[in-house]
Image (cartoon, rainbow, N blue to C red):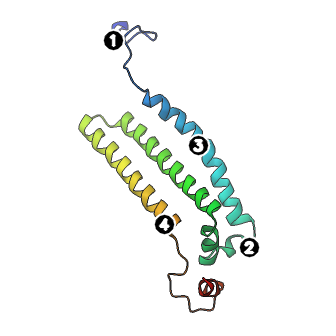
Amino acid sequence: MTAETLAAPRSTAPRKKGANLEKWGWIYMRVSGVLLVVLIFGHLFVNLMLGEGIHGIDFAFVSGKFASPFWQWWDVLMLWLALIHGANGMRTIVNDYVTGEKTRRVLVWALWITAGLLIVLGTLVVFTFDPCIPNLSDGSVLTEICKAS
């Protein structure tokens, strides 16, 4: 490869106007990665280390967590950050390895549409979760809670 085919590293070629989306994507990946580590380890600690551990996780446990706005927002933040982080990482892989422009565009659009759909569905599940919908006739704690409300 000759030196003529490579662009100079500090080229004075005019830069495109507008936001540098690649830079902001790079920053997002670093910030969301750090936040996800905190959120995920907090989630695992509360679910697996406190109380009865894994044996205590059942429908009533999840219902109790989703009754608290704190845990609703914790899980939604974790969901949003993880899906956007994953979709952005997959976008980077597609951009690096898919050579056809049309194929690359279709795959990137499919990634973002899928991530958006999962974000919407997951958010709806978290904020509209109602533990009293199933038929609770087994005498569990939830039966008493649902009768009271």
Amino acid under disc 3: Gly
Alpha carbon separation for disc pair 2 and 4: 25 Å
Task: Pick whichever, 96 or 40, lies toward us.
Answer: 40
Residue at 75 percent of width and 71 percent of height = 51
Alpha carbon separation for disc pair 1 and 3: 36 Å
Q: Which SS class for mark 1?
A: helix
Alpha carbon separation for disc pair 1 and 2: 64 Å
Query: Residue 136, relative to residue 1: is it above or below?
Result: below
Which one is earlier in the sequence, the residue at label 2 or at label 3?
3
Which one is earlier in the sequence, the residue at label 2 or at label 4?
2
Depth check, mark 4 against mark 1: the one in front is 4
Quarter of the image for the C terminus: give it.
bottom right
Depth check, mark 3 against mark 4: the one in front is 4
Which one is earlier in the sequence, the residue at label 3 or at label 4?
3
Q: Residues within 10 Å of mark 4 (few under 14, many from 20)?
A: some
Query: Residue 47, relative to residue 36: is it above or below?
Result: below
Residue at 62 percent of width and 77 percent of height = 60
Q: Residues within 10 Å of mark 1 (few under 14, many from 20)?
A: few
Q: Residues within 10 Å of mark 2 (few under 14, many from 20)?
A: few
Q: Which residue is under mark 1?
A: 5
Which one is earlier in the sequence, the residue at label 1 or at label 2?
1
Q: Is residue 107 left or right of residue 135?
A: left
Q: Which SS class for mark 3?
A: helix
Q: Which residue is under mark 4?
A: 125
Amino acid under disc 4: Val
Alpha carbon separation for disc pair 2 and 3: 29 Å
